[in-house]
């Protein structure tokens, strides 16, 4: 979408691998982040996403591949530019504020080469931006977690870095604060036109903050796409089950590229090349399952959770294998556990995966 | 071990440092390769049973007493609000500034036949010599009491933290389950604080095993006095070293107790946030009772002996405050300064080595050497003397062979030996402080500074030095005071004609010139108050944060 608008590459990872003591934790990752874009690496803990971040900052050396900033190689087999000259700022998970310095001194820490007046002006500007005007003389331990987070962000942004890295920036905050802060930070980054790459295990944070998201698993980058693409066009079953809710229904290929499952027949797009008779699994999202009283397919309510405007039902299909699907129905369709109601499957994109065996 | 560890310069520096520091204690154990059967036969037939019995009685007596004094004290101060609590919570630490041998000789002065108490009793009741019973302070029981009076703060400090750290919701849970206060105390409070109390007890018992000044002054035969006697009386260094090894064996047992308790405390109190900071107000009667309970240890362990020392010092000030006294002060000052700078520098090297290398080898080496605090000063001193005089002999052979001159006892006869022993014994104190300071500097801070454009050397200046400053200063102060108070190792290793405040105090007191000893003793105590003040500052800060 935005890719045509952004012309310059800020960060390029080319077949990047990272290893600790012969154990490879990141395998051949390729990423391209454009100027002004906010990217995100999303994955379960231990998937190698923080290692990628540390390699970009220069705290770890690549074991193979190359890493470029503004199309200049900063780390490959022959080059290792130290972190202090990369112009890559980091907001750490634990914020890493200097406890002996005031908020103002923390924010201006990276501006040590600048004139006093420049320093002060930039500091005041940033504190206003992060909503902490008047806190200049406080010390980190006098601030709440959210405020410390904002100081850490201001400190990282102060020297106008080429690239900002955020390592699980919201993990130590309350759930309510997270969402608010994620929106604020996105606004701030866009205001400063900062290119940023964030690491998180929380997909909602990723969706709120990022323009483009990379899903990682076991050291590999599985899919690099926007939120819509990850949800509606996952490249494999891992992404499909990691992002959002959903169920997998067994399905068979019929003639004419048609796909048959317990809830009807659907046309398969041409991207797929499966043989007739192949058994596949079809991704069914809760919003694909519609409430339809006229439908012949009945399903029994197994459990339900009320979500205000909608209710999320877990339904058991009345077929041999008692398969279950999720259904997001408007909440005035009120059914108790054990009741039956008719459903219809409406798929905009049919997503199938071959059965892993 | 991987190859790269051998190439790492840290491993080498730390390895060499550890080797030198561990040499004296290691040598004490190695002394068994020259078995001294005659001496042991002799000791066994005569005094060995006394050594074992007295040392064990002393240590266990002190252990029991410090628990009896320290635990209720900690409980009252952490859980009750009463008159003077605010001041008592740090006043009760003051006895830490009193070396046991100084308290011992002060009490001897107070309680002697000619001392103020008995004189007063006689004049009051018209008694004469032999008319009444008066307990003898110069006894095993007396020594136990003296040591306990100055060592109970170990238990107090650890128990207090344990009581405060107990999460409030535990008490609320127990109450909601209908458990009575008393039952809660025995079922929850005490079991949870027990590791901390045992740890304090183990530390106090180690000090009791290591004590030389008190038992020597009171004329009680223990391992430490036995080591001196075997060396200087029987003139047998190897046998003395072997006695020292046996003594160290006892202390190692205590180390296990301490280590085990320490692991348990960290396990009990992980990740619990709400602390018990609420204190119960007491009514009038209980108020006075608790005040008396908490004030008595301060009175007996500090105020009374301190006042006695003051009064003696005032009496003798004119004749004692001489050129000679100033030389003592200067000797003590520069010896303690060099020792503390050396111990803290080594601690910095070790702490950074541990931080920058997560290698198992370095962790283990540093861990081993920092156990030096448990080894009695007498033991380390004996080991240092034997090993360094051996090295001196070899050195002299070499210089005589090469240059036809001998360099004399450059190692064993100089301050080097003392500095080595102090560094070895007090490294743990320095290391603990430096590591606490270093732990405040999270690795991500280094990364943050680098990503903001700082080179490693500038990070040291902008982040590490300012953050470490206070912990390094407190490490210096603590080692300084420990060296100032140290007696047995200084007695064994001081160069000829070199006196310090602690040695002069001990010599004068041993010559029964109690009031003359007061001025140097008082100087030690006054400097010793500094770390107590520091400790209260740190405790206050911990409460506020």
Image (spheres, coloured by chain):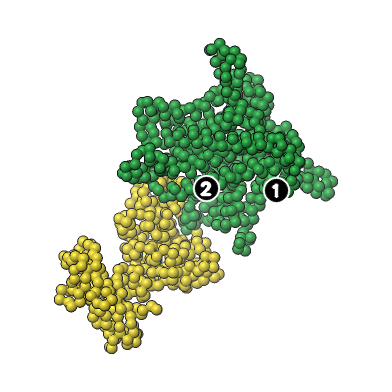
Q: Outermost residue, front direction?
A: B45
Q: Residue at x 56, y 37 (%)?
A: B60
Regarding residue B417, the answer to whether it shows in the image is no
According to the image, label 2 marks what residue?
B260
The quarter holding residue B168 reads top left
Tell me the element at label 1: helix
Looking at the picture, how far across and down is residue B222, in whole percent? 65, 35
The quarter holding residue B257 reads top right
Name which of mark 2 and mark 1 comes first in the sequence: 1
Label pair 2/1, CB-CB below 8 angstroms: no
Closer to the camera in the image, B195 or A184: B195
Regarding residue A92, the answer to whether it shows in the image is yes
Closer to the camera in the image, B289 or A311: B289
Q: Residue at x 61, y 18 (%)?
A: B113
Chain in yellow colour: A
- For the N terminus of chain B, give its image quadrant: bottom right
Q: Which mark is residue B290?
A: none
């Amino acid at each position: 979408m935005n890719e045509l608008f952004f012309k310059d590459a800020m960060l390029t990872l080319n077949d990047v691998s990272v290893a600790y003591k012969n154990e490879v934790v990141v395998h051949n990752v390729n990423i391209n982040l454009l100027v002004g874009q906010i990217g995100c690496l999303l994955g379960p803990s231990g998937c190698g996403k923080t290692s990628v971040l540390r390699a970009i900052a220069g705290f770890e050396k690549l074991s193979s591949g190359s890493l470029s900033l503004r199309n200049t190689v900063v780390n490959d087999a022959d080059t290792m530019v130290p972190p202090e000259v990369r112009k890559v700022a980091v907001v750490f998970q634990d914020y890493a504020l200097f406890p002996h310095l005031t908020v103002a001194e923390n924010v201006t820490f990276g501006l040590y080469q600048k004139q006093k007046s420049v320093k002060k002006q930039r500091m005041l500007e940033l504190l206003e931006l992060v909503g902490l005007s008047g806190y200049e003389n406080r010390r980190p331990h006098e601030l709440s977690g959210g405020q410390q987070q904002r100081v850490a962000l201001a400190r990282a942004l102060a020297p106008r870095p080429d690239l900002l890295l955020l390592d699980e920036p919201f993990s130590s905050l309350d759930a309510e604060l997270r969402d608010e802060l994620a929106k604020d930070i996105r606004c701030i980054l866009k205001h400063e036109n900062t290119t940023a790459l964030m690491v998180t295990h929380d997909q909602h944070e990723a969706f709120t903050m990022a323009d483009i998201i990379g899903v990682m698993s076991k050291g590999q980058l599985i899919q690099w796409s926007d939120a819509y693409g990850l949800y509606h066009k996952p490249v494999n079953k891992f992404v499909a089950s990691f992002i959002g809710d959903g169920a997998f229904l067994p399905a068979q290929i019929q003639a004419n590229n048609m796909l048959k499952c317990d809830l009807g027949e659907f046309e398969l797009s041409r991207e797929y090349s499966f043989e007739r008779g192949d058994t596949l699994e079809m991704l069914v999202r809760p919003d694909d399952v519609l409430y339809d009283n006229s439908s012949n397919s009945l399903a029994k309510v197994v459990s339900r959770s009320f979500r205000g405007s909608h209710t999320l039902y877990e339904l058991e299909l009345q077929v041999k294998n008692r398969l279950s699907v999720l259904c997001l129905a408007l909440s005035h369709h009120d059914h108790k556990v054990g009741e039956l109601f008719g459903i219809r499957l409406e798929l905009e994109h049919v997503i199938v995966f071959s059965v892993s065996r | 071990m991987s190859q790269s560890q051998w190439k790492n310069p840290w491993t080498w520096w730390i390895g060499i440092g550890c080797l030198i520091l561990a040499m004296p204690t290691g040598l004490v154990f190695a002394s068994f390769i020259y078995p001294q059967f005659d001496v042991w036969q002799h000791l066994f037939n005569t005094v060995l049973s006394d050594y074992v019995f007295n040392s064990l009685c002393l240590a266990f007596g002190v252990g029991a007493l410090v628990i009896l004094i320290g635990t209720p004290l900690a409980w009252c101060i952490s859980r009750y609000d009463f008159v003077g609590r605010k001041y008592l919570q740090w006043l009760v630490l003051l006895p830490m500034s009193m070396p046991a041998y100084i308290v011992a000789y002060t009490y001897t002065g107070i309680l002697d036949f000619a001392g103020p108490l008995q004189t007063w009793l006689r004049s009051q009741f018209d008694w004469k010599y032999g008319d009444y019973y008066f307990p003898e302070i110069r006894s095993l029981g007396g020594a136990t009491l003296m040591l306990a009076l100055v060592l109970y703060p170990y238990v107090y400090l650890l128990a207090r933290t344990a009581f405060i750290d107990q999460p409030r919701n535990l008490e609320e849970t127990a109450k909601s389950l209908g458990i009575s206060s008393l039952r809660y105390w025995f079922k929850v409070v005490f079991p949870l604080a027990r590791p901390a109390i045992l740890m304090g007890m183990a530390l106090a018992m180690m000090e009791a095993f290591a004590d030389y000044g008190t038992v020597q002054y009171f004329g009680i035969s223990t391992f430490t006095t036995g080591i001196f006697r075997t060396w200087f009386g029987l003139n047998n260094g190897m046998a003395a070293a072997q006695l020292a090894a046996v003594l160290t064996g006892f202390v190692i047992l205590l180390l296990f107790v301490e280590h085990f308790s320490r692991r348990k405390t960290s396990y009990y109190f992980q990740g619990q946030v709400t602390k018990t900071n609420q204190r119960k107000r007491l009514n009038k009667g209980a108020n006075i009772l608790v005040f008396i309970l908490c004030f008595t240890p301060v009175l007996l362990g500090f105020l009374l002996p301190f006042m006695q020392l003051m009064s003696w010092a005032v009496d003798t000030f004119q004749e004692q405050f001489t050129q000679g006294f100033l030389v003592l002060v200067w000797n003590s000052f520069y010896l303690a300064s060099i020792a503390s700078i050396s111990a803290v520098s080594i601690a910095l090297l070790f702490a950074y080595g541990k931080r920058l290398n997560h290698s198992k080898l370095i962790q283990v080496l540093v861990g081993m050497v920092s156990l030096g605090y448990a080894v009695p000063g007498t033991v380390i001193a004996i080991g240092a003397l034997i090993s360094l005089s051996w090295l001196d002999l070899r050195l002299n052979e070499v210089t005589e062979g090469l240059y036809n001159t001998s360099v004399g006892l450059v190692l064993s006869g100089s301050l080097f030996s003392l500095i080595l022993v102090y560094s070895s014994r007090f490294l743990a104190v320095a290391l603990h402080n430096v590591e606490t300071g270093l732990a405040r500097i999270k690795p991500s801070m280094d990364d943050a500074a680098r990503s903001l454009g700082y080179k490693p050397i500038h990070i040291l200046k902008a982040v590490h030095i300012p953050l470490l400053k206070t912990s390094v200063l407190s490490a210096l102060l603590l080692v300084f005071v420990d060296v100032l108070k140290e007696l047995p190792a200084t007695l064994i290793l001081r160069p000829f004609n070199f006196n310090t405040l602690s040695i002069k105090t001990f010599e004068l007191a041993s010559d029964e010139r109690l009031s003359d000893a007061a001025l140097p003793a008082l100087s030690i105590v006054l400097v010793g108050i500094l770390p107590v003040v520091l400790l209260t500052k740190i405790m206050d800060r911990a409460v506020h944060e």
